[in-house]
Amino acid sequence: MQKSYKILLAEDFEPGRKIMSEILEALGYEHQTASNGFDVIFAMKYTNFDLILLDLQMPMLDGFETLEHIRRNMSFPKNNTPVIAMTGREYASELLQTYKSEGFDGIIEKPFSLDSLDNLIKKTLKEGIKEIVFN
């Protein structure tokens, strides 16, 4: 039997958040949503997540600032929660080293396929490997 993983989905664009939520449900993942970096930090104070899907361009705190707060200010094991960056940036591959040095465990470019997302989530959760997916 597959373990039920709890994912925190951070996406500021409400239609995108709704679609991603439906995708995670269809894939069988328990999840909670956040619309900005402050919501992510608040949610993490009260809930342990197995993985965070973090949009990079959000209001108030962007994905980089949110990840920095998680890694520097939260105690173990929360500060070690795997984080997959979601980006709509073109040519994100040129920023690959930046993403890695910032501490992301995976990166996926929007739009992405259902299979690409599911495979990256599974690899990150089960194997703890850092991977980048460009579509």
Image (spheres, helix red, strand yellow):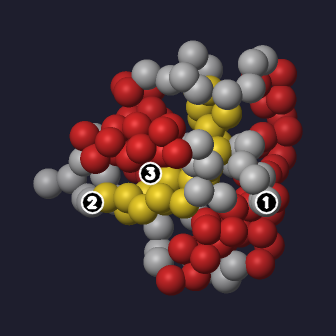
Taking the view exactly as shown, the residue that stands out farthest to the left is: 1
Give above or below for 18 relative to 87. Answer: below
**Labelled disc at residue 26:** none
On screen, residue 68 versus residue 76, left or right, reads right
On screen, residue 121 versus residue 80, left or right, reads left
**Labelled disc at residue 125:** 3
* Residue drawn at x 50%, y 53% as measured from the top left: 9
Q: Nearer the viewer, mark 3 or mark 1?
A: 1
Is residue 88 shown to the viewer in this render? Answer: yes
Identify the mark nearer the N-term, 3 or 1: 1
Give the residue pinned by disc 1: 60
Give the residue pinned by disc 2: 4
* Residue drawn at x 27%, y 60% as measured from the top left: 4
Identify the mark nearer the N-term, 3 or 2: 2
Mark 2: amino acid = Ser
Identify which residue, 50 or 110, lies in the foreground.
110
On screen, residue 132 versus residue 22, left or right, reads right
Q: Quadrant of residue 71?
A: bottom right
Identify which residue, 43 or 73, lies in the foreground.
43
* Residue drawn at x 54%, y 22% as measured from the top left: 111
Residue 89 at x, y = what percent?
Answer: 74, 26
Residue 63 at x, y = what percent?
Answer: 73, 51
